[in-house]
Amino acid sequence: MRKVIVSEMISIDGLIEAEHGGMNWFVQDAELNAYAMELLESVDTIIYGRTTYEIMASFWPFAPGDFAARTNQLKKIVFTTTLRETPWGEWEHARPIHGGIAEEITNLKRQPGKDMVVYGSGSVVRQLTNLGLVDEYRLIVNPVILGKGKMLFENLHDRMPLKLVDAKVFACGGVALTYIPA
């Protein structure tokens, strides 16, 4: 069965977005980029919410490099209540889904193929977490305290124990923590 992997850049205080939407606090280096590329090579589908889709679709279809090329080749689905079309530059369009997140993800997990990854998309992550449909969390903790912004895990229904299965420290100061539901 395919897995749903959540991959998030977060601050030390658990935020995925600065107060006014800024994301210029992410740390990057060659080692972290290789880690991100390894994950991208292990999946065949990217899951987005509408807001993250709009940010990503305005950049990645036109970006250079291996990460962009791989991102552009993958299937993409967008959970949205407002968008009817989800173009991705000159690449295959993303598929918009208008509700039924539990049914859609459960169905996708049963289909053959590689794993799926959710990037950003805090509202989708919260819904999937509340539904118990996330198989793995890859949190890349950035060496910054933002103080204000958007929390990744707010308004969850229940406590969820997790088991740490991997930890990597990068020279740029980021730490990748991989958890699975306990």
Image: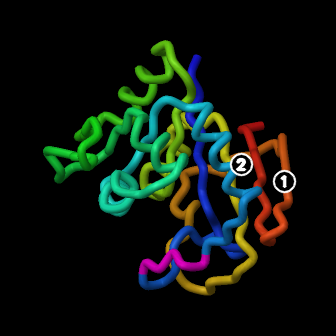
User: Tags 1 and 2 in contact by the CB under 8 Å rule?
Assistant: yes
Look at the picture and state if 145 lies above or below 154: below
At a point 32% along the width and 55% down the height, the residue shown is: 57
Q: Residues within 10 Å of mark 2 (few under 14, many from 20)?
A: some
Disc 2 is placed on an element classified as helix
Apparent side of residue 93 relative to residue 163 in the rendered image (left or right)? left
What's the amino acid at mark 1?
Lys
Apparent side of residue 133 relative to residue 14 in the rendered image (left or right)? left
Q: Nearer the viewer, residue 38 or 5?
A: 38
At a point 50% along the width and 38% down the height, the residue shown is: 131
Query: What span is colored magenta in the figure?
Result: 21-25
Q: Main secondary structure of the magenta part?
A: loop
- Decide which of tag 1 and tag 2 comes sooner along the chain: 2
Residue 33 in the image: x percent, y percent? 67, 55
Residue 19 in the image: x percent, y percent? 48, 84
Q: Count every numbered label the image shows and give the total.
A: 2
Disc 1 is placed on an element classified as strand
Look at discs 1 and 2 and give the one toward the viewer: 2
Query: In which quarter of the view is residue 154 placed?
Result: bottom right
Look at the picture and state if 35 lies above or below 1: below
Look at the picture and state if 178 lies above or below 111: below
Residue 143 lies in magenta, yes or no?
Answer: no
User: What residue is pinned by disc 1?
Assistant: 168
User: What residue is pinned by disc 2?
Assistant: 35
